[in-house]
Structures are given as C-alpha cells and as structure tokens.
C-alpha cells in the first residue's frame, strides 16, 4: 500500500473532523480579542504543513493568523516582532500530562508557567477528577497558561488508575453495559476526551492489575465516539495494542514495550485508525540530569533498558508503517518534569530513528490531528489560532534547538520572552480563598451532594487489595438523615476507610476558616476514628471516639496535627482549607462502621 503524503494526511484530517473535542479549555487571561495586530517579520517559518522551512512574515489579527508570506507587510500600527535569524513554529502539544502535586513543579500556576516558557501551548491533563473540571477551567482562565484539555478517566475494578482513585475520579467498568453507562454519566462534566486504563501489565516489576476485555473497550470507544469524544488508552503491551486497534481506540498513549512489534500487530493497530503517543520521556532509564547507570547493574535495571529499547524500536516501526505518532510525555510522573519533558520527547523520537522534521510534526500538526484540533491550530496557516513559538535555532536540522525558546504567543498575545508582560498571576500557588460557610453537611439534600453543593467521595486505602467501603445517606428517625460509612479492611499493615466532604467543588478553591474555632459534628460508631482536614499545604488530623449512642464532638483546630503519612506542613493557618474527612482504620480483615450528622464549623 502506498504511504500517504504528509500534506494529504493533514488536509484529509482538517476536512473530516467527524470526531473531536466538543469544548477545549481556553486557558490564559489575556486573549487577543481587542483588535490588536501583531506582525512577526523575518522569521524562517516551519509551518508544519509539509512545506520546507522558508522565510516569511506573519500577520496576526484578533488572535488568528491573517496573512503569511515572504512579501507580507506589517500593517500600520501593528506591534512588530523582529524575528530575523529565528525559527517560527506552531506552539507545541503535550497530549499526556498529569497536573499532580507530586510532579515537578507541583502547583497549577507553576505548571502552566513551565509549559508556556517551553513553547508548549496545548496540553491534556489526565489527573483531574471530573468534579474539578469547571473550577480548574475557571482558575486557568485567570492565568497565563496553555490550552488545557481534561480527560475523564475509566478503568476496570482492580485496574491501573482504579488502584488508588475513588470511583468519582476513575469510573470502574468491566462490562459493555457499564462502559456505556459510565461514558454517559461523564457527559455533564464536559470532558474533552476519555482516558481508559486498559492494560494491567506492571512492566514485569510488580503484580499485574486487571485489564479491560475487548468487548468492554469496544463499547466504551463506540459510546465515546457517539458523544464526539476521543479515547486515549493506557496500553503498554503488544497484545493489548492489538486489542486497542480492533476496538478502534483513537490513541495508544504509551510505548508498547514488553516485546518488539511484529507486522501483524502493526497492521491491526493501523487498520483500527489508532495513533500513538509513545511517552518515551517517562520510560527513559537514565533521565536528563541523572548519573549514568550500568545496564547490567541488576536484573531490574537491565530489564528497564531492554524495555526502553523495545519502546524506541516500536515507535519507529509504527511510524514507518504510517501510524500517526503524536507527542505525549506522562509529565508529572517521577523524573518527568513539566515543559522540559515535552521538548525532550522530541529528542527521544529522533533517538528512536525519526527525523527532526518527523519529531516536530509529532509535536505540532500530528498532535493537533489526533485530537481533531487541526482545523484550529497546529500549523501556521491563514485562519489558524496564533499559538506560536520563536526559537533561536533550526530544530528541523538539530532537534535539541527546540530548547532555545525565545518568545511564545498564545491566541496572538505575547506571553513569554522579551516584551511579554510579567507573569504576575502565575506567582500564586493556589486560587484565592473564599470565606468558609458554617454548615458543611447535614446530609439532607436529595441529590446526594453536600450542603456546600460538593460531591462526597469515598477514600479507602489504595493498591490491588483495597478496603471495600460503602457510604450512603440513611434515615435517622426524626432527626432526618445521616451519613453511614461501613467497610471491610484490606489485608495490609494500616488499612483505612473514609469519606471526604470537599469544601468547594472539586476541592480546588480553598476556604478561609479563621472566623471559626474548629469542626463540630454528631457521631456514633464502634470505636476510634480520626477527623481529617486537608489544606492547600497538606493534611491534618485529630482522633476521636464514638459508641452506640449519638454524641456531639467538637474538635478545635488547635487539636489538629500534621498527618505525616499523608502529607502535612509545619504551620497551621486556617486560611486554605479544602476538605474535611471522617476516617478510621482497623486490623486487616476486620470491619468498621460509623454514622455522622450535622457537620459544621463552630
């Protein structure tokens, strides 16, 4: 079969657009909607259409590319950027990131800055719970940030991604019917795509998780496509790659690395219209800045080098077969910092055997293509969104030149580099706090949400063997309703169960509770428990006990101590609370129960 040309692939994708992101998060404060005209003159343009780099001037109006060409003149009154000797490219994409507190950096404004300063203008976040989509989008709109697409997560019971998350963060499905129902339940949150954890292989270094069967995955993909949502899958083995292809998954979002691909597997993946983001940066055995390692140091290290060699080989094999390679990194995971890893991923693609041009295409037009944004951005063409990066170098010749970022524009606004406004809003680490309300939850709402209109979530311990927990609102006689928590402890040293009550939707915006002294609640149960309070800086807790009869408990903030095992900080301020939790632990295999009512600040 003749391999399609680059130009034909891009044109076909831009025209098709049958599946795509219904709503893409536009995530920066200053948008070019004020009639501003910008002219970039004298640059060598890599437009990502398949054309060779060429000298051209670019005129931007209202955040869109209005003119491109060697004879284009800067309009009168335009803001002129002299780019002589520099390369102008579309802003880069990273389609696999985790905006998690454990990443580098670990706070939203600083993560945004890391991407913007690297020329990365569109990313997908696979870490956020659907409840947090709306407040995160609102927060990002106040920052200088890339466009952020949010992925709703799905896995199997006992699967990767379900081994630590609650069922509101990661939907658990193991039948076609459950998969379709889960997709439908996510639609009100307006996800930009679906991330499905379908492969339970743990790289040969830990017990395998469960994997999603082909019937369930096929139904999941079909239902997502009916709702114009792309499906990315955590797939890391060749056999599961074939399942992804037969299920018509849109993007495999990892390297296939248990063994080298064969021609049959490649053909199945290609026939399914499935693309790949190899995330080589997260799997590199020796990451930038780390000391060298001997591949024969020990069996695990030797295996990591072998798997990475498979990953490099398989990325090149898929590319050569005509499978679209896009860019994702798994940034936010250990050793994979935000922003810098996106640029390093292109270097690793070249190490795998792709040309620098191939790598640049993966980081721009092809990433836009696989999430159906190519009609909006990803190339430098008239009518496209002016997300652009100026580089002091020629990355189509030397891929490491992608690190020489000079200036970055998002929606036609200069947001980084000489002449850009200071990133003042990005200096904060949290959203501004709002005043705490006295009533947290009386468990009387019929829709199952708290008195604060937040979604309560179960919080059992994580791992393959998880505590089995059930929480529900029950009738409390003439007193109305109460929360019932019951669980059977998992077989581990310190199992626990709990229920979290977010103080704002998605636990994103903190509340200032300095007007109060502590937390008051009514409770009954079967022994010892703890009240947990999460803040922007960590977790705090205090013990309490309960018996068969209802009683009122008051826990002053002064009684809270840093919960060292689950994160804490040295100083309590009371100004940045995000969650209240009721939790308890027993010995492995034992049961626990507790009922709670009328939770307030006092």
Image: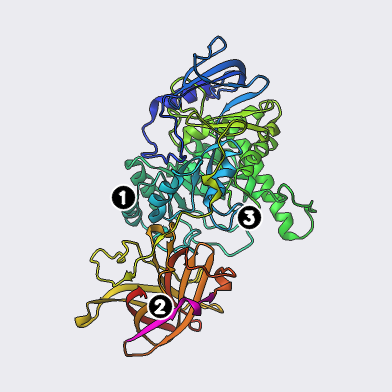
Please name whichever residue, 63 or 46, is drawn nearer the observer in this view of the structure: 63
First reached walking from the N terminus: tag 3 or tag 1: 1
Up the image or down, 203 lies above or below 516; here it is above
Disc 2 versus disc 1: nearer the observer = 1
Query: Which residue is situated farthest in the left direction here?
Result: 478
The residue wearing badge 1 is 188
- Between marks 2 and 1, how big is the CA–CA gap? 30 Å
For residue 489, say whether it is visible.
Answer: yes
x and y percent of residue 487 in the render? 40, 78
Crowd rating for badge 3 (residues with CA inside 10 Å; few <14, some 14–19, many 20+) = few
- Between marks 3 and 2, how big is the CA–CA gap? 32 Å
Left or right of 588 on screen, residue 46: right
First reached walking from the N terminus: tag 2 or tag 1: 1
Up the image or down, 461 lies above or below 351; here it is below
Q: Circle 1 — which element?
A: helix
Q: Circle 2 — which element?
A: strand
The residue wearing badge 2 is 487
């Amino acid at each position: 079969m003749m391999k399609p040309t680059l130009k034909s692939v891009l044109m076909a994708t831009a025209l098709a657009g049958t599946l795509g992101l219904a709503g893409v998060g536009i995530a920066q404060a200053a948008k070019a909607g004020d009639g501003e005209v910008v002219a970039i003159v004298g640059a060598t343009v890599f437009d990502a259409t398949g054309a060779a780099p060429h000298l051209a001037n670019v005129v931007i109006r209202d955040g869109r590319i209005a003119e491109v060409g060697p004879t284009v003149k800067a309009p009168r009154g335009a803001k002129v950027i002299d780019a002589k000797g520099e390369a102008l490219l579309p802003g880069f994409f990273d389609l696999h990131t985790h905006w998690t507190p454990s990443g580098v950096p670990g706070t939203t404004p600083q993560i945004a800055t890391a991407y913007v300063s690297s020329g990365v203008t569109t990313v997908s976040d696979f870490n956020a719970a659907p409840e947090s989509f709306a407040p995160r989008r609102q927060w990002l709109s106040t920052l200088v940030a890339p466009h952020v697409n949010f992925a709703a997560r799905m896995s199997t019971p006992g699967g990767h991604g379900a081994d630590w998350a609650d069922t509101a963060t990661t939907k658990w499905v193991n039948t076609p019917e459950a998969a379709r129902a889960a997709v439908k339940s996510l639609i009100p949150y307006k996800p930009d795509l679906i991330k499905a954890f379908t492969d339970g292989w743990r790289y040969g270094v830990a017990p395998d998780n469960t994997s999603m069967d082909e019937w369930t995955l096929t139904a999941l993909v079909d239902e997502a496509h009916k709702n114009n949502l792309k499906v990315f899958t955590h797939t890391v083995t060749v056999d599961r790659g074939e399942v992804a292809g037969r299920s018509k998954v849109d993007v495999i979002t990892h390297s296939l690395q248990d063994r080298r691909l064969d021609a049959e597997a490649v053909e199945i993946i290609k026939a399914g219209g499935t693309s790949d983001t190899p995330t080589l940066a997260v799997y590199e055995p020796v990451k930038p800045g780390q000391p060298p390692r001997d591949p024969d140091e020990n069996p695990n290290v030797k295996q990591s080098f072998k798997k990475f060699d498979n990953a490099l080989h398989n990325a090149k094999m898929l590319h050569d077969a005509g499978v679209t390679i896009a860019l994702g990194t798994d940034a936010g995971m250990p050793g994979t910092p935000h922003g810098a890893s996106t640029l390093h991923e292109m270097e690793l693609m070249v190490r795998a055997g792709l040309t620098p041009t191939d790598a640049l295409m993966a980081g721009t037009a092809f990433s836009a293509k696989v999430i159906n944004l190519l009609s909006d951005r990803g190339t430098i063409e008239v009518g496209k969104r002016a997300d652009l990066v100026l580089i002091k170098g020629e990355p189509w010749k030397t891929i490491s030149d992608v690190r020489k970022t000079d200036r970055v524009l998002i929606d036609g606004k200069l947001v980084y580099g000489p002449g850009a406004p200071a990133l003042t809003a990005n200096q904060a680490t949290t959203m501004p706090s709002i005043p705490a309300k006295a009533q947290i939850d009386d468990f009387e709402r019929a829709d199952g949400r708290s008195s604060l209109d937040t979604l309560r979530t179960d919080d059992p311990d994580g791992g393959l063997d998880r505590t089995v927990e059930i929480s529900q609102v029950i009738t409390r006689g003439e007193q109305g309703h109460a929360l019932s928590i019951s669980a059977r402890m998992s077989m581990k040293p310190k199992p626990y169960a709990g229920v979290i009550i977010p103080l704002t939707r998605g636990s994103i915006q903190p509340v200032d509770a300095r007007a109060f002294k502590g937390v008051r609640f009514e409770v009954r149960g079967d022994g010892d428990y703890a009240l947990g309070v999460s803040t922007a800086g960590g977790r705090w807790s205090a013990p309490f006990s309960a018996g068969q009869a209802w009683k009122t408990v008051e826990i002053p903030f002064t009684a809270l101590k840093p919960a060292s095992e689950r994160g804490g900080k040295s100083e309590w301020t009371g100004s940045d609370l995000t969650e209240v939790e009721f939790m308890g632990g027993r010995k492995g295999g034992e049961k626990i129960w507790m009922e709670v009512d009328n939770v307030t600040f006092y």
